[in-house]
Every structure is written in C-alpha cells, then in structure tokens.
Amino acid sequence: MSDARWMGAALTLAARGRGRTAPNPAVGCVIVTDGKVVGRGWTQPGGRPHAEAMALTQAGVHAKGATIYVTLEPCAHRSQRGPACADLLVAANPARVVVAAIDPDPRTNGAGIARIEAAGIAVVTGVRATEAKDSMAGFISRQRMGRPHITLKLALSLDGKIALPDGTSRWITGPEARAHAHLERSRCDLIVVGRGTLDADAPLLDVRLPGLEDRSPQRALLTHGDAPAGWVALAAPQDVAKLGAVDDVLVEGGSGAAAAFLAADLVDRLIIYRAPILIGAGRDAIGDLGLADLASAHGRWKNIDTRPLGSDRIDVYQRIRGE
C-alpha cells in the first residue's frame, strides 16, 4: 500500500474531528508496521489529545521502526495541555514519518519536522497536502488571515429564488440535499443567519442526522440588536474574527446576510443546492452587492465540485485569492 493510500486513511480519520477541535486543527494519524495498522488517532473534541498522541498510545512498542502517517506536521511547542507531538514521535523511534501539510502556526512551522529529522528519523512531506489543507481550511485561515474559514450555503430554484413571495421556503430542495446540508453543519463551529430568516422561519440550525445529533454548531445572528438566549450576536460579518474557538463558519441565510458576507469579501467557499423547479416571482437569493460593473464579477470563483443529490444538484465554488 502506497504512502498516498495510507495518508488517505489518515485524512478519513481527521474528518471525524471536524467542527469539534477548534482552535486546534482536526488531524488524523495512522501508524503502520509490515503493512498492518498498529495505531490510529484523530484530534479529540476540545483539541486534546492530539491525533499522534492517541495513535502512539494505541500502538505502544509497535511504533518503533514503523511508518507514521499524519495529516499535519507534528507540533513542536509544549503546552500545559500536553507534550509536543514531535517529542512523542522522537521517543517512539519510528523508521519514517510521512506528513501531508506543514503547520502554519509559527510555534511549529517546520520546527516539528526539524526536530524529528535531528533524531535520525526519515521524514517525507507533501503527500496529499492539498487535501489535508482543505480539511483544515478553518485552522489555516485563522493562522494566515486572522479569521475563520467561511462557507455560504444557498438552496435555490432554477431561476435563483430562495422562497415564494410570502417567504415560504420549505422545501425547495429534496431530502438528499437537505441531508448534505446537515452534514455541512456538523463540520462547522458556528452557523449564522440574518434577522429576516430568524423571524420568518425560527430555524433550529441543529444537526438532524442519525449519530451526529451532538454535532450541532453554535448559533449566531447577524443583527444590530440582541440575539436570542444561547445565540451569539454579530453586528457585522467581520465580527466572526473576534470569536474564540471558531475556525469554520457556515452562513445559511437569508439574502441580506448572504449579501453582507459577500460584499465584505469574507466568503471562502460557496455551496449552491439547486432544485429542478421554477418559482418566478419570489425572493432573491442574494441582496445588493453594490456591483459597479460586470467585469469586476468575473475571475472570483472556481468550481471545485458538481454532482447530483437525488433530483437536485450541488455546485461548490472556491474563492480565488492570491497567495
């Protein structure tokens, strides 16, 4: 089995922690000896134990001489919550460590790999790095831009409407698309709606997939007033950067909130669920963006996924930004 395939297993494990580990990244780790898995781990809720610590505990003495696959560079900094993973790996004495992505946290950022190599352990980097970075987009966004990674979700008719003229919107999309939307919720730390959506729909914004009910994200309201009890009030889209332990944000509606985040150029990922229906007169998906000309609208989004979901279709776009 190749390094890429074993790293795929580590990436799958990492996905188990998404939406539950902030401000730590959701990392996956697999320890392999003679083609057999002897240890596996993923970042636990709240950020500890780290994936490597969990996998090494499971592997025990079998980690010696093994190959360790980890989706993010092992941390080099020590904290009151636990030892540095780079030190744990050195003590375990594997033959090789295969790393997907380098940690952008300045406390590590190459130092973890350097420490492991200094102990005479071979290190390979960059294996499925793009996928690893995508899975940790919120953590990386925090490190590089000082704010969470933000996804805007829209459920539309073919003619771009999100509701009838009276606001009725249940249901535009079918059960498969709605289930996928709940999966997206489970991977986020915070979910945001505008005042209009709250007043019209009184949404629960919870996760209603069997086995994932405990993964409902924190709820936030984009408003100049107060938020309901248990909700976070955001006076402006930029305020998400002020929230602690929030790496991934999902904006669900309505048109005013969507326009506000888009106009502030804070949307990194756009998910559009499109149902094969026509509404005609109805409520638009997005409010005014203040667009001056069509030329400035081009070259901003790249399609990264398109596929059917039951009778509906999902299109996922990524914001094109300079490095």
Image (cartoon, rainbow, N blue to C red):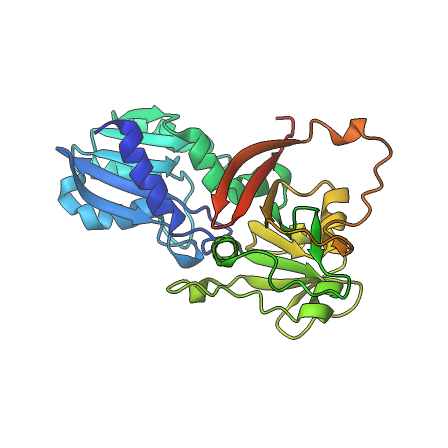
Seen in the picture, residue 7 relative to 78 is either above or below; the reply is: above
Along the viewing direction, whichever of 304 and 192 lies nearer the viewer:
304
Return the x and y of residue 172 as percentages of the image width and height.
Answer: 61, 58
Q: Which quarter of the image is occupied by the N terminus?
A: top left
Seen in the picture, residue 148 relative to 217 is either above or below; the reply is: above
Residue found at the far bottom of this picture: 229
Along the viewing direction, whichever of 27 and 223 lies nearer the viewer:
223
Along the viewing direction, whichever of 299 and 60 lies nearer the viewer:
299
Name the residue: 44% across, 58% down. 46
In the drawing, does residue 259 fall left or right of residue 47?
A: right
Q: How many marks?
A: 0
Return the x and y of residue 84 as percentages of the image width and height.
Answer: 36, 43
Residue 110 sits in which quadrant? Answer: top left
Name the residue: 59% across, 53% down. 250
Question: In this view of the protein, can residue 80 be seen by the observer?
Answer: yes
Q: Which quarter of the image is occupied by the C terminus?
A: top right
In the drawing, does residue 145 fall left or right of residue 113?
A: right
Question: In this view of the protein, can residue 84 be seen by the observer?
Answer: no
Return the x and y of residue 276 as percentages of the image width and height.
Answer: 59, 49
Residue found at the far right of this picture: 292
Name the residue: 38% across, 54% down. 48
Seen in the picture, residue 96 relative to 70 is either above or below; the reply is: above
Return the x and y of residue 242 as percentages of the image width and height.
Answer: 66, 53
